[in-house]
Amino acid sequence: MIEITSKDNPLLKTIRRLSQDPSGYRKQGRVWCEGDHLCRAALHRGVKPLQVVMTQAVWQSASWAWTDVCDQVFVVSEALFASLSGLESPAQMGFVLDYVSEVAVQAGQPTVVLDRVQDAGNVGAILRSASAFGFKQVVAMRGTAALWSAKVLRAGMGAHFGMNLIESASPELLAQLHLPVVTTSSHQGPYLHDLLAQNQLPGPCAWVMGHEGQGVCEEIMALSQWQVRIAQPGGEESLNVASAAAICLHASASAALLTPP
């Protein structure tokens, strides 16, 4: 264990940058993962931290849970940890993880494509739904919120660590998936519930979720083999993109369960 007492310590400066800059992990080559739940999720998926940082209170009460996960364990005061945290109530411990920028496409893997989805909460929620419903790959087009930012990590609740995550992609990359591309539309295409009832949903596939205001771009629409609508009998114009994603991905998971082997 190494105790850090200076706010100007190089490691703490790096963590602050990671916490405050949503895309800072790309420059630093590191990811800041804050909180017991996220850190345990990373370990559960076989992700090993480069460093563990904890408060003195955690060191005194629960150091046994974290001291064996890597060789570099750092302890700071509660006040210093608060200066690292982006939370109103700092979590009091976290991991510094390695960031892998070059990730290969897994052809044939059920995939969610994010087309310029900009809200970090929406992106994290979609990753969480994707993982829950068996979509283990996410392709984020340029203009999408940074997948490994602190806010997206928190909203994802650990889903990141079990998925193949590709960022800053262009529409041309979709051809490498070797999957039917399915886009959502509020005004054209068959209804999702009809396709599910008729056992006509394609699977495996790549579901595209579009920008919160503009929807899926024309270039990706042109590449899609399917355009699907979600029935909204209540009369709203559109659904939140994370809600729409959960409905579509659940439908795909249900179709897979209902299809005979």
Image (spheres, rainbow, N blue to C red):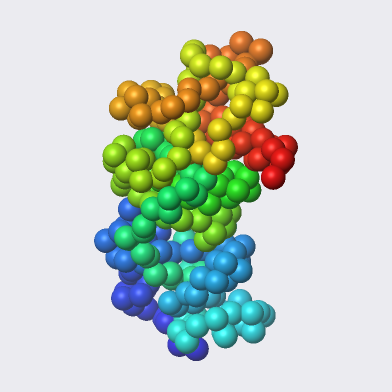
- Where residue 79 sits in the image (x, y, percent)? 49, 69
182 is higher (above) or lower (below) than 127: above
Residue at 51% over, 16% down: 189
- Quarter of the image where the C terminus is located: top right
For the residue pair 109 and 73, the one nearer the viewer reads as 109
Left or right: residue 134 versus residue 183 is: right
Picture quarter containing residue 210?
Answer: top left
For the residue pair 255 and 82, the one nearer the viewer reads as 255
258 is higher (above) or lower (below) than 216: below
97 is higher (above) or lower (below) than 255: below
Mark yes or no: residue 217 visible: no
Picture quarter containing residue 68?
Answer: bottom right
Q: How many marks?
A: 0
12 is higher (above) or lower (below) than 202: below
Mark yes or no: residue 66 visible: yes
Left or right: residue 20 versus residue 94 is: left
Left or right: residue 22 versus residue 233 is: left
For the residue pair 241 and 4, the one nearer the viewer reads as 241
As drawn, the residue found furthest toward the left would be 27
Residue at 56% over, 54% down: 159
- Where residue 64 sits in the image (x, y, percent)? 64, 84
- Where residue 56 sits in the image (x, y, percent)? 56, 79
- Where residue 70 sits in the image (x, y, percent)? 50, 83
Picture quarter containing residue 89?
Answer: bottom right
Residue at 63% over, 45% down: 133
Residue at 37% over, 65% down: 99
As drawn, the residue found furthest toward the front would be 261
